[in-house]
Image: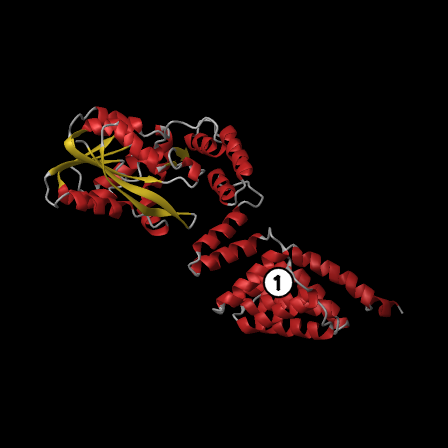
Amino acid sequence: MQAETGSGPAAAATELAGGLEAHRRGDLAAAERIYREILRRRADFAPALHYLGILLHQREHSEAAVQHVQRAAALEPGHAVWANDLGNVHSERGELAAAANAFRHALELGGDDATVWNNLGAVLERAGRDAEAEHAYRSAIACDGEFAAGLNNLSRLLANLRRPHEAAEFAARAYALPPHEGKSPEMLGLAYCRLGRIGEAVDAYRRWCQAEPDNPAAAHLYAAVSRTGVPARAADAYVEQIFDAFAANFEDKMMGTLGYRGPQLIEGAVARLFAPSPSLDILDAGCGTGLCGEALRRYARHLVGVDLSQGMLDVARRREVYGELVKSELTAFLATRPAAFDLVVLADTLIYFGGLEPVLAGTHAALRPGGVVIFTVELPDEATAADGFDIAPHGRYRHGRGYVEAVLARCGFALLSVEAEILREEHAQPVAGLVVAAGRP
């Protein structure tokens, strides 16, 4: 009678609990001994068959693993979790069709489940069935809107399908999820801004300022998002910090990921005004890594680049197109070069200035009579700022056309041309801007 009790379902279940505990803590040898001892006495005890199958798969005995898991499912066919486990075994063996069938069976047994939908999406994506994979990932997110794996997988799939705006939305949703420890406070704030959760972005940047009170990026972005204490222009320390850190991969990021068009737009504006002969003294103001310098050198008798970032200047120097490279804040530098240039170019530079009058007045003084300034600005999103300027949550200033034209007139310039263009992308959205040319009469 004792032997009967020891081999009954209750005793097997008790032993199984011990096996599962050993399995969870990674003692596979002990777990296997327990599972096999249960099966020696009760060969049809489905839970032991199933978990032994999972263990065998972990030990890379996948053929035997599939047999055990399938036999367990045949004995007790109602377990959605077991069907999901079988799908994972098939998936790791590269048996994508079998895995998809197992995950679908799990959904039939257990109803909608974020993890199972996500697993199904992953094998469908690997099989090249992108539309079905997208549906599966979206179903996972419909089950649980804070399911990070589903959000990240859908974001990656949409990016691969060249739908970057949608991809950015889901990436931001995933990044904004807790825990926040170890995440970049800058990226966390930007994710909140991307989702329209401005209050949370303000809180994230406030905490960043408290943690790093001397960090100029934290102070600048907090001001940009909270609209509290917005500076007249970006602080020198902020500009130096972001571009020194950005210098090594600046061109790959800007020209590749962000589709930056500044250099070609500047080149087109210059070509409409000047013949391509090396006759001009040119200032590339905010020259960065020298992307505009490549286009300007065929017009230049002497080409000067000025920038706040030593890291960017080091890259620009390797191009060997500048006669002179200077590390300086722009308005201070302009004050040292009265009537020195025939052409001043500011590509993606004025986005770090709020009010433009000081820098454009300095540019006017640095130009010779008949000289020309060519620059780009980003346009505000809201009509209310169309004739003024504002600061965007990402920390760049944006200027309305009416405001730009009024400042040029006050500084003594004659407007030559204004072209509306797309300058780059931000969060997979086109950034509208202006390419402006004005002359010193």
Report the front residue among 76 and 278.
Answer: 278
The image shows residue 332, relative to residue 323, as above or below, that is above
Report the front residue among 33 and 210.
Answer: 210
Q: Is residue 227 left or right of residue 146?
A: left
| Residue 18 point in image, percent of width and height | 73, 58
Residue at (63% x, 65% y) in the render:
85
Q: Assign the N terminus to one quadrant of the image.
A: bottom right
Report the front residue among 30 and 365.
Answer: 365
* Figure colour scheme: secondary structure
Q: What amino acid type should be assigned to the residue bearing mark 1?
A: Val
Q: Is residue 5 left or right of residue 230?
A: right
Q: Mark 1: which secondary structure?
A: helix
| Residue 87 point in image, percent of width and height | 60, 68
| Residue 157 point in image, percent of width and height | 48, 60
Image quadrant in which you'd find residue 220: top left
Q: Is residue 197 left or right of residue 40?
A: left
Of all residues, the one furthest to the right in this rendering is 1
Report the front residue among 46 and 163.
Answer: 163
Q: Assign the C terminus to one quadrant of the image.
A: top left
Q: Is residue 185 visible?
A: yes
Q: Is residue 319 visible?
A: no
Residue at (52% x, 45% y) in the render:
195
Label 1 Cα neighbours within 10 Å, binned few <14 / some 14-19 / many ≥20: many
> How many numbered dots are placed on residues in this image?
1
Residue at (52% x, 28% y) in the render:
210
| Residue 150 point in image, percent of width and height | 56, 56
Where does label 1 land, which residue? 116
Image quadrant in which you'd find residue 151: bottom right
The image shows residue 12, relative to residue 395, as above or below, that is below
